[in-house]
Image: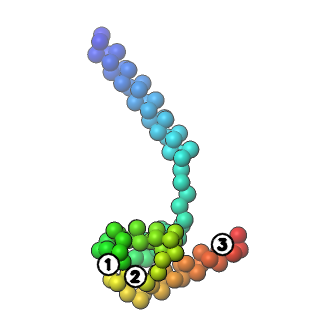
Amino acid sequence: MTILYSALFMLVLSVFLGIMIAIFAKVFHVQLDPRIEKIQHVLPGYNCGACGYPGCAGYADAIVEDKISHSKCTPGGTDVTNKILEILKEGAEEAKTA
């Protein structure tokens, strides 16, 4: 009987904690700038650190948030630089119209 009560208690506890995690995920959700994801898809994804950031995700975030140079991706070359510039211009145009 002790095993049954223990198993039932663990089941109830896990369901309760699962519901709490779901609630907290909705309440504390952080909306990210969609340009970060677009820039991250444009970058080559080598995570080489040539730009001075730990990876492509960090560099994309720094481009959008810190307003650093968009031409530091050495492996991507001018193709990537031009695509990033287009994404930043699109974001600026959307901000003006909103």
Mark 1 → mark 2, Cα distance in angstroms: 8 Å
Could you tell me which quadrant the N terminus lies in?
A: top left
Q: Nearer the viewer, residue 66 or 64?
A: 66
Residue 81 occupies which quadrant of the picture?
bottom left
Q: Nearer the viewer, residue 38 or 33?
A: 33
Residue 21 tag number:
none
Q: Residue at x 44, y 35 (%)?
A: 18
Against 62, is 23 above or below?
above
- Give how far apart the Cα atoms at labels 1 and 3 are: 30 Å
Task: State the residue position of label 1.
Answer: 50
Check disc 1 and report its element: helix, strand or loop: loop
Q: Position of residue 70 (x, y in %)?
A: 46, 81
The reply to whether discs 1 and 3 touch (Cβ–Cβ < 8 Å) is no
**Residue 48 placement: quadrant:** bottom left
User: Disc 1 or 3, which lies upstream in sequence?
Assistant: 1
The answer to the question of whether label 3 and label 2 lie on touching residues, with beta carbons closer than 8 A, is no
Closer to the camera: disc 1 or disc 3? 1
Describe the element under mark 3 as helix, strand or loop.
helix
Helix, strand or loop for disc 2: loop
- The residue pinned by badge 2 equals 72
Amino acid on which disc 1 is placed: Ala
Q: Are marks 1 and 2 in contact (CB under 8 Å)?
A: yes
What distance separates the C-alpha of mark 3 from that of mark 2?
25 Å
Where is residue 90, by image quadrant? bottom right
12 to 58, vertically: above or below: above
Amino acid type assigned to the residue bearing label 2 in the image:
Lys
Q: Furthest residue to the bottom? A: 78
| Front: mark 3 or 2 | 2
Give the labeled residue for mark 3: 95
